Image (cartoon, rainbow, N blue to C red):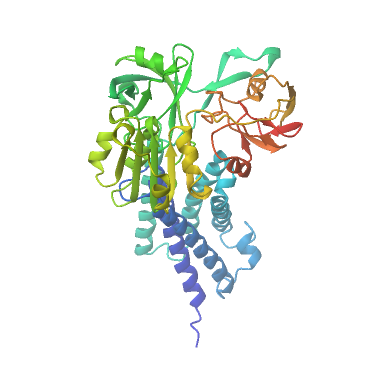
């Protein structure tokens, strides 16, 4: 004979399990975002566990709701289970639980569509899980039949305490960063338009500036009183706003876990337009440099195996990626350059990671690097940064789904003759024509619209905008065109349109 209270027991058990799983999922997500677990293992299985906890929790919530319908003691109807305030039984606490359920569905749904949603929107939805956790705590505290039991009190207090501590840690460690935006009243656009927003800058002090190779200057930057700097992940770069009016982007090459300083390495280029030359001639310890960022379009994706290929100063983002991986992760580095004396960090990397690092200095070899052999052995994700000739050669040998590139200079891309473009800005309710000889970014700025510009060459990705209608002509080198089409974004500093007009989400 069936136990008459079976569904009542299932309802109680599934509710407690769901609460535990949700707390674990939130805490695990916080550990990932603050990189506390960085030294334990690669984010791949950590993120998989985070998703598993969230998905299993939602299944338990669903089981809890179904069991309430089948439980003959309470006998909830489907409407009472799904619609807030549809029941007279503890209406407010039950409504809070139902609201939390819908928030959790939105969080899980947005996670499945993460790569197709605007990053800020996804984050906003994802952070609502904190609110759901609070709602569930009130729901459990006022509707549970075991509220008065000692074991229930111990479980409830423990879960609430763990979640509270994790959230405090999350708030105190800050968030990963894209440059925030602020308004400079001195740069108001003509005709009474809104002022043009500028990147949020902070003054950082140069604490050391030492050669790390011939022609390469290693620079360490700190905030006032060694305050914590914004969180960053491997592949991120800073924008330096130099006193001579130039803005230059440099990859962060230090340890992402150390948030008291930023490390960059600057190559002195022969055909410098004034950026690297100024840095090498003028940067000394004690001086202050205005910096914005970090910004990241070259993120290290979770994977079981990596092949890193660096050419020259392209080693900088690779160094940060390698140092963020745990000792047991499977990876290898091929580092090519003209000579060892010009290859930054070569000796350090070779000594620290013996057997994983292959140095290919042209002055030491009579034969060139056999890319077919190097790439042919790789089955995991391939990251490459360096001269365009190297990156193009690697990209030709690796499937697009496993290939990741970062360019320091823009590709010379064939484009149609420039034609006027009609641009409509949906949120700002502004529309204007951009002449053939003017960039879309310049036109946006002239009309006082909130778009940031930095490199203006289609490399840094600062001016990213979302496209609602029309077809962009992608002339930048920030990411693959297919990815931009999938995300419906463009970089208006160099890109235009293949259609007469564009509708932008700004």
Place of residue 361 in the rendered image (x, y in percent of width and height, measured from the top left): 32, 34
State left or right for residue 449 relative to residue 387.
right
Hey, which residue is sitting farthest left in the picture? Answer: 351
The residue at the point 31 percent across, 48 percent down is 326
Say above or below: 27 vs 241.
below
Residue for point 50% across, 88% down: 1
- Residue 55 drawn at (x, y percent): 50, 59
Q: In the figure, 319 relative to 377: above or below?
A: above
The answer to whether residue 261 is left or right of residue 497 is left
Nearest to the observer: residue 186 or residue 169: 186
Task: Give coordinates of residue 447: x percent, y percent.
Answer: 68, 20
**Horizontal side of residue 505 vs 290, given as left or right:** right
Q: Quadrant of residue 221?
A: top left
Residue 223 or residue 444, whichever sits in front: 444
The residue lying furthest to the right in this view is 500
Tell me the residue at 53%/68% (across/down). 63
The residue depicted at 42 percent of the width and 65 percent of the height is: 146
Q: Is residue 436 visible?
A: yes
Q: Position of residue 333 (x, y in %)?
A: 34, 43
């Amino acid at each position: 004979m069936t136990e008459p209270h079976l569904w009542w027991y299932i309802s109680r058990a599934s509710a407690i399990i769901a609460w535990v799983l949700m707390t674990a999922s939130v805490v695990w997500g916080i550990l990932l975002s603050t990189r506390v677990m960085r030294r334990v293992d690669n984010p791949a299985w950590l993120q998989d566990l985070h998703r598993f906890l969230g998905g299993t929790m939602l299944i338990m919530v669903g089981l809890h709701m179904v069991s309430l319908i089948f439980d003959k003691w309470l006998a909830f109807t489907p409407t009472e289970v799904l619609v807030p305030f549809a029941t007279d039984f503890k209406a407010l606490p039950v409504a809070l639980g139902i609201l939390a359920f819908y928030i959790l569905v939105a969080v899980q749904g947005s996670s499945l569509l993460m790569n197709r949603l605007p990053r800020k929107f996804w984050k906003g939805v994802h952070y609502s899980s904190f609110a759901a956790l609070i709602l569930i705590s009130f729901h459990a505290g006022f509707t549970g039949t075991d509220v008065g039991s000692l074991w229930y009190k111990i479980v409830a207090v423990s879960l609430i305490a763990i979640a509270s501590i994790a959230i405090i840690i999350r708030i105190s460690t800050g968030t990963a960063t894209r440059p925030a935006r602020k308004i400079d009243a001195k740069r108001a656009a003509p005709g009474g338009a809104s002022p043009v927003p500028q990147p949020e800058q902070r003054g950082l002090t140069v604490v050391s500036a030492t050669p790390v190779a011939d022609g390469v200057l290693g620079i360490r930057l700190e905030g006032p009183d060694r305050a914590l700097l914004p969180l960053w992940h491997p592949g991120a770069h800073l924008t330096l706003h130099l006193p001579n009016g130039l803005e230059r982007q440099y990859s962060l090459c230090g340890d992402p876990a150390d948030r008291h300083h930023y490390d960059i390495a600057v190559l002195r280029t022969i055909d410098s337009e004034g950026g690297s030359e100024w840095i090498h001639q003028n940067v000394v310890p004690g001086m202050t440099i205005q910096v914005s960022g970090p910004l990241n379009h070259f993120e290290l994706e979770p994977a079981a195996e990596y092949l890193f290929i660096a050419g020259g100063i392209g080693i900088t983002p690779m160094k940060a990626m390698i140092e963020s991986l745990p000792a047991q992760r499977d990876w290898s580095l091929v580092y090519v350059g003209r000579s060892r004396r010009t290859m930054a960090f070569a000796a350090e990397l070779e000594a620290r990671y013996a057997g994983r690092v292959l140095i290919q200095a042209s002055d030491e070899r009579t034969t060139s690097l056999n890319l077919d052999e190097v790439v042919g052995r790789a089955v995991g994700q391939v990251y490459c940064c360096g001269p365009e000739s190297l990156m193009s050669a690697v990209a030709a040998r690796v499937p697009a789904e496993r290939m990741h590139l970062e360019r320091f200079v823009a590709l010379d891309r064939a484009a149609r003759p420039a034609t006027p473009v009609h641009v409509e800005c949906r949120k700002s309710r502004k529309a204007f024509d951009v002449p053939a000889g003017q960039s879309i970014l310049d036109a946006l700025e002239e009309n006082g619209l909130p778009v940031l510009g930095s490199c203006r060459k289609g490399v840094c990705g600062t001016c990213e905008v979302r496209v609602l209608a029309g077809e962009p002509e992608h002339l930048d080198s920030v990411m693959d065109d297919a990815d931009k089409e999938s995300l419906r974004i463009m970089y208006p500093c160099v890109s235009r349109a293949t259609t007469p007009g564009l509708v932008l989400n700004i």
